[in-house]
Every structure is written in structure tokens, then in C-alpha cells.
Amino acid sequence: MENKTSPQIHADYLGMCRAVAARIAALIREKPTAVLGLATGSTPLGVYQELIRLHREENLDFSRVTTFNLDEYLPLSSTAPQSYHRFMREQLFDHINCQFWHVPSGAARLGEQIDADCAEYEAKIAAAGGLDFQLLGIGRTGHIGFNEPGSGVETRTRLVVLDSLTRSDAANAFFGLENVPARAVTMGVGTILGAREIAILASGDGKAAIVREALEGKITSKVPASLLREHPNTTWHLDTEAARELTSIAQPWRAPDADVSNFELRRRALLAAAFAAGKTLAELGEIDLANAGAARFAPVLVAAQSEVEADLKARLSDELLPQNQTVLCLSPHPDDDVICCGATLLKISGRGNRLFVAFGVNGANAVRDKDVLALLRARHTRLIAYLEEHLEPGKSFEDAVSDVRASIFEREPGAPDAPLLRELKRLVREGEASDACRKMGAKPLFLDLPFYGDGAQRLPLGEADVERMSAMLETVQPDLVLLTGEKNDPHGTHMMCEAAFEAAAEKYLANGGKTFKKWNYRGAWDDYQTAEGDYFSIFDKAAMEGKIDLILDHISQLDPLFPGEQPKEFWERARDRNRENARQLQRLGVLPPSRSFDPLYCEVFRFDEV
Ligand SMILES: [Zn+2]
């Protein structure tokens, strides 16, 4: 067995999941009675979807496979929407032929009984012959399973108290922090390390910092995932976003075999040195480069200043924008388009391009019941028209309104929306997105991807999602596609939309669809760093006001229901980030300084090789 310390970096999430699923499939074909350790959370979803596909299309047989899941909240009924038991059924076991699957019990019971059950879980794993393969995700604190910081290699399956960060991460899923169970049962770090092979997955920039700490920091129980480095057969699977803070990628000049003849290395080193020293590129001296860890290349780098400056200035040019082409912006939620690229979309539609915005999910989950009530009272045209057109036989318009009200007032916490209420929420968001598209001169396309579910339950990404996405590509036939490059949104929706798009694009290209360029955007939750930008779309205060108007068209998203960690409104985040992006270019001396009453703003795009 080889000790693979360097991670496998995959171009995208779908590619990562397929590689891991292929490994699991190979293992099962080699050993039909394989024992698998499985994990929940949004990261492994793509692996399960691929395993389901392999089962259906390539007869992958799970009938003799045994599985053990890592953990479960306690107390929590196995039918609760947040239960990992239920998650595994819905995302995997309802769709394959596995009969011997185990998830720790979340049933409320006495402490001694829990201890006895934990010992029994360990005994079952041992009786099955131990874990052949363990699939893992990584939590933001570096936890694996519910092994919070401080869990050492000696720990086995046991009762744990959850960390406040872990609980607050789960708050959205439980409709409030107060509903998140305080405890959980988890396999121990020792149980996990007992597996003969481990694959740990991380996707999205939200995991980049902890991935770096786990792979490059000290091996310590404070970061339980770092303990995997002492396991002889662990593979780290990362997508490019999760890998972005690793030294070899973010600071390539620090590597012993760094090659300064590489332009990208010179560029990265000079930008890092300039930001660290608070100087423009032109002001950098050898000492600043030495301080940034590039002493051995200082003379070459100083000589490269004007070249890097010219390169950066070329990236500010609107000549990089398409002209007279077909441009598609794929917006996972109905407002990612305007928050992240509103100003640039306005520029694009002004250059003779045909502009389409395809919205991945309908966004109904983020509409409050009370907003629907308020809009009905205000006789919102779109909602009223819908109710009038869809009256059930024998019912009046007033009956329909009171049905909606009753479904809101009588629902249990965490129960799905009644179908009619759900439709109204979808219409609220479609209406808002349509208004913004009209102002941008864009044609909206609502994909309403089925995986998004009904508000209480999500479905695995399936053929239906990919079909809708492919049909959209066939219709639009884009020359350029703008895709979100951020996947740390609260429910993993961006990741699922990307996976659906990648699968659809493969089909589309295989069927003779014409190739297109891809640009990635960010800005709803995070932004690109200057060194990562390929096109800096600069705009002025008037354009910023235009962009804010587009964001404010999404009235239901003021004071957002799922704000993430930042308490600010989306339009405030966009304005502040776009201002900061421009400021960084001004600090580097490549964008002229602006007066405080007439600031400049910038949306950053990254080009993706197809
Ligand atoms: Zn989003």
C-alpha cells in the first residue's frame, strides 16, 4: 500500500464524485461482500448519485455489501427530515439493492443503553470483518463524523456533545438553532482509522482553509482530519476550489522545485508580495519579495514587474467581453445572477449579444410564509392571476386564499409546503427574476430542477435534472456560459446545479453541440482573490446603482431567510465586495485611484478551460 499524501485534485465536483464512485465500484466487483463506511452531508451526494447510476445502468450489485454509517443526531427519530437514517434511505438505499445497511440509532434512551448500543455497533463492524473502505467528508472545524476537535485516535463509537459551530451549521436544516439536537452518536477516530482504505472528499472554497490546515498543519487531535495523514491508505479528493489554499497552488514559489520561468508563478509571487507589503507592483523591492518567501527569485521577480502589471491591465479591458454572441448565465438560485454579475450582464446585453439567464432551482425554500400572506393581501397580480386560473371545481377565489392561509397556520414545524403554497412561492421568485431579466435585456429560463424537492425533502440529482439542463443547452446553444464558482451556499444547491450542468454539457457536446467558453463568477457568499481573476469587470457608481436595483427586484430576499454567516443584505454584500475588488486593483497600481464620492467597483471572473 502506498501512502498517498498528495491529494488528488479534480477539475470539478462531478469528476471528483465519479472517481470516488468508480473506486467503490471496483472494490465491490473485486469483493462482493465488501464492508463500506458511509457518510452524510452534501459532499458525498454526488458519489451516491453515481453509485445509483452504476447500479441501474451497469448492474453494480450491492446485495452482499454491508455498510455502516458514521453518525446520527440524538435524540432524533429516524423518520425526521434531518435524520441521517432517512437521508441515507432517500439518497441511496431506496435506489440500490443493499440490504445490510446500518446507521447508529438516534432513539432517545438511557445513557447506559446508548453505551451498550455503541459497543454493539463496534462489534457488528468487527463481525463483518472490519471496514474495507471508509468514505468521509470534512467539517469546517476539521471534524470527521461527529468527532469534534479534541477527539483522538483512541476514540471508538460513542455519545458526543456537539460543538457550537457544528450546531449552528445545522441550524438551517432544523429550522432554528434551538431545534438542533445537542448530542450525537458517532464512530470514533479509531474506528475510522481501522478502515483498510479511506477516501476523504472536500468540495468548494468554504472547505479550502480547513483542507490546508488538515494537510499542511500539525497532525493533531485538534484537527481530527489531520490524523488521517498517519493512515497508510488514505486518499484526499479535492475539487479545485477546496484545493485553492494549498501552498503548491496558492504560493507555488515556495515549493522546492519552483520554476521561476513560469509566468503564473511570477505573477502570483508579485501580487502576494505587493499585498503583503501594502505597495503597488511598481514599488516592490527585493526585500518585499524576500518577506513573501521568494528571496531566491527576488532579482528575476523585480525584473518581471512591468510584465505582470501589463498582464493585469489587459485583464481589466472590456474588450474581453463577447460581442454579437449568445451568452448564457447559469444562476443556481433566482438571484445569484444579479448579485454576482449584475453589472457585467448589463454590459454584455449592451454589446449586441443574445443574453439568457437559466435559473437552476425555483428558490421557493427561501420565501417566507408571511410574505406570501402579505402579497396575497396586497393582491399581487401574478399570484392572484395564478389562483384565479387554477381554481378547483366548485371553489371560489376566496376559498383558494383561505386554503393557502389554513395550510400556513396549521402546518407543523419542518413540514413541507402545501402544493398550492409551494406554487405561489415559486411564482414570487420567478416574478422577481423576470423583472430583473427584463431590465437586463435577458431572456429568463426557469429550469425548476426537481432535486430541489418540496421544502422538507430533497431528492438525489437524477436524469430528470440532467434532461432539463440538456434541453436548455440545446435551445440556447451558447458561445459563452457564466457559471457559479462558489459552492459554499448553505444547502449545497450550487454544487448540485454544477453537477447537473457538467453532466448535461457532456451529453450536449457528445451529441454534436458546439463548444463554448466557460467563465466562473462568485460574489453571493465569497469572492475571487485578485490573483485568481482573469477578467476584472470595472464599473462606476451609476452602474452599481443599476445593479443594486436588479438585486432589489428580489424583494422576498431582503433580510434573507438563509443569510449564511453574514448578517448583511445581499445588495450590501455585493456593493462592499465589488468596491473591495476595485480597491485591491487600485492598491496594486493598475487601476487609477478614485474619489470617495465617485468610487469604482469590480466584478471578478475566472476563465475555465473546457
Ligand atoms: Zn445561490
Image (tube, helix red, strand yellow):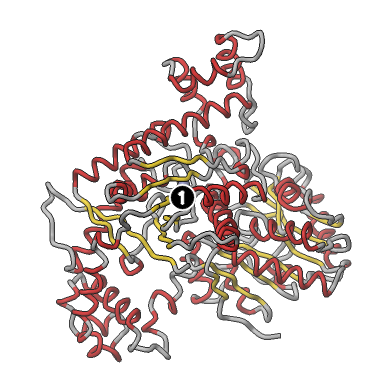
Q: Viewed as shown, does residue 273 lie left or right of 592?
A: right
Q: Is residue 575 visible?
A: no
Relative depth, front residue between 346 and 133: 346
Few, some or many residues within 10 Å of mark 1 (<14, 14–19, 20+): many
Quadrant location of the N terminus? bottom right
The location of residue 355, given as percent across then percent down, is 38, 47
Seen at 33% across and 48% down, the residue is 345
Seen at 43% across and 48% down, the residue is 565
Place residue 18 in its image quadrant.
bottom right
Q: Is residue 230 visible?
A: yes
Seen at 74% across and 72% down, the residue is 195
Residue furthest front in the image: 512
In the picture shown, does residue 62 fall above or below 178? below
Place residue 387 in its image quadrant.
top right
Seen at 77% across and 44% down, the residue is 107
Which residue is labeled 1 in the image? 330
